[in-house]
């Protein structure tokens, strides 16, 4: 047999389920993604995502419950709570995110990583805003911004608490 069409999905393809009329199918992957595909063109349309490793932290912006962020071994994700859709993914290759919080003014997402850095990202683009190098020797495991957004309290794997 000859290959008629092919497409790439994130991770290994772990399941396929055809519709009753065989015009479309769902494809699931080892990276916890679900794709909707046309059986003729295969062009995978991402329909759903989730973390495929443990979730280390979850945070809601101050006074706002329609949005939340989660962090896992591989990334930070921002979600729409009403539609359950992923809006933004922030990845720092090779690092694990232990903690995530929104600054109370909503202007940045704080995160603590296993390399000992605190990183702040812009909430709409995911672009790195700043990093605090050497915040904790063995990883930043807890974060709390002050209400006036002038300081950050952090906790580390080594058991120390610091104010920035």
Image (cartoon, rainbow, N blue to C red):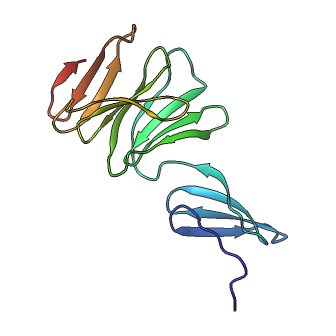
Relative to the observer, which residue lies in front, 123 or 22? Answer: 123
The residue drawn where x is 40% and y is 49% is 74
Farthest right residue in view: 21
Count of marks overlaid on the render: 0
Farthest top residue in view: 148
The residue drawn where x is 48% and y is 14% is 105
Relative to the observer, which residue lies in front, 101 or 28? Answer: 101
Classify residue 65 as left or right of residue 147. right
Vertical placement of 134 versus 14: above or below? above
Q: Quadrant for residue 18, please give it.
A: bottom right
Q: Position of residue 86 (x, y in %)?
A: 58, 41
Q: Position of residue 29 (x, y in %)?
A: 55, 63
Location of the N terminus by quadrant is: bottom right
Q: Quadrant for residue 157, please give it.
A: top left
Q: Position of residue 144 (x, y in %)?
A: 34, 20
The residue drawn where x is 73% and y is 81% is 4
Q: Position of residue 119 (x, y in %)?
A: 34, 32
Location of the C terminus by quadrant is: top left
Classify residue 125 as left or right of residue 54. right
Q: Quadrant for residue 120, please give it.
A: top left
The residue drawn where x is 46% and y is 36% is 70
């Amino acid at each position: 047999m000859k290959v008629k069409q092919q497409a790439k999905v994130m991770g290994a393809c772990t399941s396929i389920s055809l519709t009753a009329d065989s015009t479309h199918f769902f494809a699931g992957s080892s990276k916890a993604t679900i794709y909707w595909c046309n059986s003729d063109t295969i062009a995978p349309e991402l329909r759903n995502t989730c973390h495929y490793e443990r979730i280390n932290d979850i945070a809601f912006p101050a006074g706002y419950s329609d949005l939340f962020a989660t962090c896992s071994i591989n990334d930070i994700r921002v979600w729409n709570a009403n539609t359950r859709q992923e809006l933004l993914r922030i990845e720092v290759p090779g690092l694990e995110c232990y903690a995530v919080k929104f600054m109370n003014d909503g202007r940045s997402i704080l995160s603590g990583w296993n390399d000992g850095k605190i990183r702040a990202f812009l909430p709409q683009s995911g672009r790195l805003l700043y990093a605090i190098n050497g915040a904790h020797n063995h990883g930043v495991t807890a974060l709390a911004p002050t209400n006036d957004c002038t300081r950050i309290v952090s906790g580390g794997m080594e058991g120390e608490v610091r104010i920035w």
